[in-house]
Image: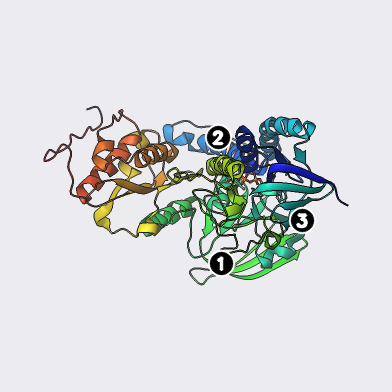
């Protein structure tokens, strides 16, 4: 007879979503068990947001030195790959250590059970090495993992995903990055700027999370100036040879390309960590997207006692959403069956390339808006951007006819991470374009570019504020 631990809420996965879910359930007065086989430390701190931003910070530093000549400053530079990675690992370890402290506390309190979990029935979970956990409700927060396209599976230890790249001792000479989504683009550009001979392969001209055809064209143009980027290709051969991995492909222009790479970095999408959970024993089936059908406002899977939070549900796979979903799922699991609905925050995602990319609110693909509800700015002649030599990119805002409400934005430009927040907060506060224009804009700042796009949108939507008056424009020195 296996040992049975009885709790109100079992949380599967001790990542960002799982840790917040457990805490949130506990705050509601529920007894909890947190189940995770490790490695601990969260994807974000260990192999995700933080180490990738650390690598990008080094790449930005190298790029800054190269760009110094623009300002009349001459200098020489060497990238020491081993030192770059040493700093990445040292700082990454600090972030991970913070998480490990909480994990250690939960271990000592007997809340953390270290083993893989799988359902035996809707309320019974088998934990490898720990027996059974009986729970009234369960939060599944098992995250996702990189999917390796079958042709690359034979590349052996030359293959890396985000799980391996930050563990390297030194930078490889030649890297193939498979995927031009957020991770492929961020890491591919960082490697290029750190002096690694990098080739990026994408499909269907997809570039980061952009969906607006005009934005995609602009992004492809800008990134192709710097990167060996093939945003569409037809793969012909992947073969491990003595010197590395030999890859042959035909590019969008019909030209055959051949390269030998020391390493292949896979960034071609992710899949949910669900296959080991035996969800069918909990009476749960998967939909056409490969996840259980769930309500994003309650995180509940249909009318079951199971809640799905974080990357595992594939809804908005970014950190702040994982944390928020964890909080909501944990509270609802504790309250089950009386669950509460919560309004989701405005969608916001940022890509830390240069120029940065951001998507806010509803992307173009959801609305397919014509130009009569779009406002646009090109950063080429934007004052502050030119001052800093970063005047590249475009920003498109989408608004609603009649109401004049801001609905969404796709951005590519200098430090758009900040403008993306301003727009997200404005959308969430249901502000009209005119109301946003009534806010202060300092001079000279990159946000003045945003103001130009807002004016353009105001004019596309045929609204004016104050009614009938033209807005005053401030130029340089005005
Ligand atoms: C390279 C990279 C860069 C990123 N950069 C950013 C960024 O800049 N900004 C941003 O917002 N987001 C970024 N993200 C996304 C962000 O990291 C994720 O959205 C977030 O970490 C998801 O948290 P989670 O709790 O859902 O999953 P995780 O943190 O992955 O937690 C899942 C946990 O489940 C456990 N588990 C798996 N299977 C089982 C099982 N059978 N039983 C029990 N436990 C199990 C795992 O061990 C793990 O601890 C990045 C991701 C990557 C990969």
Examine the rendered structure and indicate whether residue 365 appears above or below residue 458.
below
Q: Residue 22, position in %: x, y?
A: 65, 38
The mark that comes first in sequence, 1 or 3, is: 3
Quadrant containing the C terminus is top left
Describe the element under mark 2 as helix, strand or loop: helix
Q: Is the CB of mark 3 within 8 Å of ligand 1?
A: no
Q: Residue at x 34, y 35 (%)?
A: 447
Q: Is residue 443 left or right of residue 102?
A: left
The numbered dot on residue 288 is 1
Alpha carbon distance from label 1 to label 3? 33 Å
Whether residue 156 is visible, yes or no, is yes
Describe the element under mark 1 as helix, strand or loop: loop
The mark that comes first in sequence, 1 or 2, is: 2
Residue placed under numbered mark 3 in the picture: 157
Q: Residue 80, position in %: x, y?
A: 67, 37
Tags 1 and 2 touching, CB below 8 Å: no
Mark 1 against mark 3, which lies toward the viewer? 1
Nearer-the-camera pick, 405 or 148: 405
Instruction: Say few, some or many: other residues with alpha carbon within 10 Å of mark 3 (under 14 / 14 to 19 / 20 or more).
Output: few
Instruction: Say few, some or many: other residues with alpha carbon within 10 Å of mark 1 (under 14 / 14 to 19 / 20 or more).
Output: few
Query: Dividing the picture into quarters, in which one does residue 434 lie?
Result: top left
């Amino acid at each position: 007879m296996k040992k049975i631990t009885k709790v109100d809420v079992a949380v599967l996965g001790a990542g960002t979503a799982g840790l917040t879910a457990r805490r949130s359930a506990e705050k509601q007065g529920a007894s909890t068990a947190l189940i995770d086989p490790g490695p601990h430390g969260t994807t974000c701190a260990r192999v995700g947001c933080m180490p990738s931003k650390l690598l990008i910070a080094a790449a930005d530093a190298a790029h800054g030195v190269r760009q110094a000549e623009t300002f009349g400053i001459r200098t020489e530079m060497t990238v020491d790959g081993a030192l770059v990675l040493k700093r990445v690992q040292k700082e990454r370890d600090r972030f991970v250590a913070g998480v490990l402290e909480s994990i250690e506390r939960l271990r000592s309190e007997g809340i953390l059970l270290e083993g893989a979990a799988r359902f035996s029935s809707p309320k019974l979970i088998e934990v490898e090495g720990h027996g059974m956990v009986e729970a009234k409700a369960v939060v599944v927060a098992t995250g996702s993992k990189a999917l390796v396209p079958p042709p690359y599976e034979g590349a052996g230890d030359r293959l890396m995903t985000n799980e391996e790249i930050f563990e390297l001792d030194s930078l490889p000479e030649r890297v193939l990055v498979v995927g031009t989504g957020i991770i492929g683009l961020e890491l591919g550009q960082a490697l290029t700027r750190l002096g690694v001979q990098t080739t990026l392969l994408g499909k269907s001209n997809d570039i980061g999370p952009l969906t607006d055809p005009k934005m995609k064209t602009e992004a492809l143009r800008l990134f192709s100036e710097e990167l060996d980027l093939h945003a569409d290709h037809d793969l012909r051969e992947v073969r491990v040879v003595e010197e590395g991995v030999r890859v042959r492909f035909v590019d969008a222009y019909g030209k055959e390309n051949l390269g030998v790479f020391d390493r292949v970095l896979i960034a071609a999408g992710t899949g949910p960590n669900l296959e080991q959970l035996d969800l069918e024993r909990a009476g749960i089936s998967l939909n056409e997207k490969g996840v259980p059908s769930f309500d994003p406002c309650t995180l509940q899977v249909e009318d079951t006692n199971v809640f799905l939070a974080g990357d595992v549900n594939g809804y908005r796979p970014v950190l702040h959403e994982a944390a928020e979903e964890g909080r909501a799922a944990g509270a609802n699991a504790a309250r089950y069956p009386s669950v509460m609905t919560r309004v989701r925050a405005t969608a916001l995602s940022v890509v830390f390339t240069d120029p940065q990319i951001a998507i806010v609110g509803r992307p173009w693909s959801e609305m397919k808006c014509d130009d009569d509800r779009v406002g646009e700015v090109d950063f080429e002649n934007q004052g502050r951007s030119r001052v800093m030599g970063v005047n590249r990119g475009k920003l498109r805002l989408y608004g609603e006819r009649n109401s004049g409400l801001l609905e969404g934005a796709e951005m590519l430009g200098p430090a758009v991470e900040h403008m993306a927040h301003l727009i997200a907060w404005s959308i969430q506060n249901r502000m009209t374009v005119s109301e946003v224009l009534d806010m202060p804009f300092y001079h000279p700042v990159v946000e003045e570019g945003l103001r130009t796009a807002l004016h353009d949108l105001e004019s596309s939507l045929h609204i004016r504020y104050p009614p009938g008056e033209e807005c005053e424009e401030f130029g340089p020195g005005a």
